[in-house]
Amino acid sequence: MLSATETIQKLMQGRSRIAAAAWLLVRDYHAAEDCFQNMLLKAMTKDVSFPTEAALMSWAFVVVRRDAMDWLDRRGRKVAILDEKVLAMLDGQQVALATDAHQSTLAALRECLASLNEEGNRMLKLRYFDGLRCEQVAQSMRLSLPAVYKRLSRLHEGLAQCVRGKLLAADGGM
């Protein structure tokens, strides 16, 4: 487990990338910094701990994006979602710049996403690519809000297990 000091150090080292994730949504430097500060405050004041740096960074990106979407909602703005072609181009650029470990993880994630059923794919597309809030996903899929939360949680956990399994298999089971 990362100590509180290590957690803050890692978050500060990743500050520009984390704040950039908020800026991509809000398009406002000061608002993006506020989102980063809010996430940092949560990390310092909540009783959260992370087994790895990857888990910490994943949490940080989720929290900062949610805060950015809330910021937009409070101001009556819509979330700026990039066209899928642009996302594919950015994804290609990211893969080109990523380390071998990140490339392996991205490849494993792509394989795991490809293995999802139609409902799982639809739910993830609505939530993350179309930028819908969970309430809107529930309406669109004619599900209750708790059902959406539970299914998203299961999808996240299933994808995480799938990726870990593929990475272990690629490393020869080490």
Image (tube, rainbow, N blue to C red):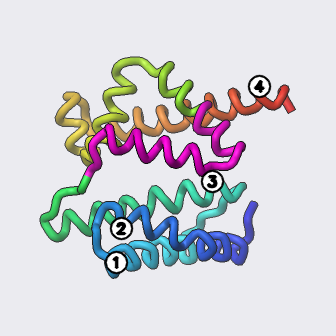
Between marks 3 and 2, how big is the CA–CA gap?
22 Å
Q: Nearer the viewer, mark 1 or mark 4?
A: 1
Q: Point out the stretch of residues depicted in magenta.
A: 81-107
Tag 4 or tag 1, which sits nearer the N-term?
1
Between marks 3 and 1, how big is the CA–CA gap?
26 Å
Q: Residue at x 47, y 71 (%)?
A: 39
Give the residue pinned by disc 1: 29
Circle 4: residue type: Ala
Residue 55's disc is 3
Say whether residue 46 is left or right of residue 165. Answer: left
Tag 3 or tag 4, which sits nearer the N-term?
3
* Residues at marks 3 and 1 touching, judged by CB atoms closer than 8 Å: no
Circle 1: residue type: Tyr
Give the residue pinned by disc 4: 169
Between marks 4 and 3, how big is the CA–CA gap?
20 Å
* Residues at marks 3 and 2 touching, judged by CB atoms closer than 8 Å: no
Circle 3: residue type: Ala
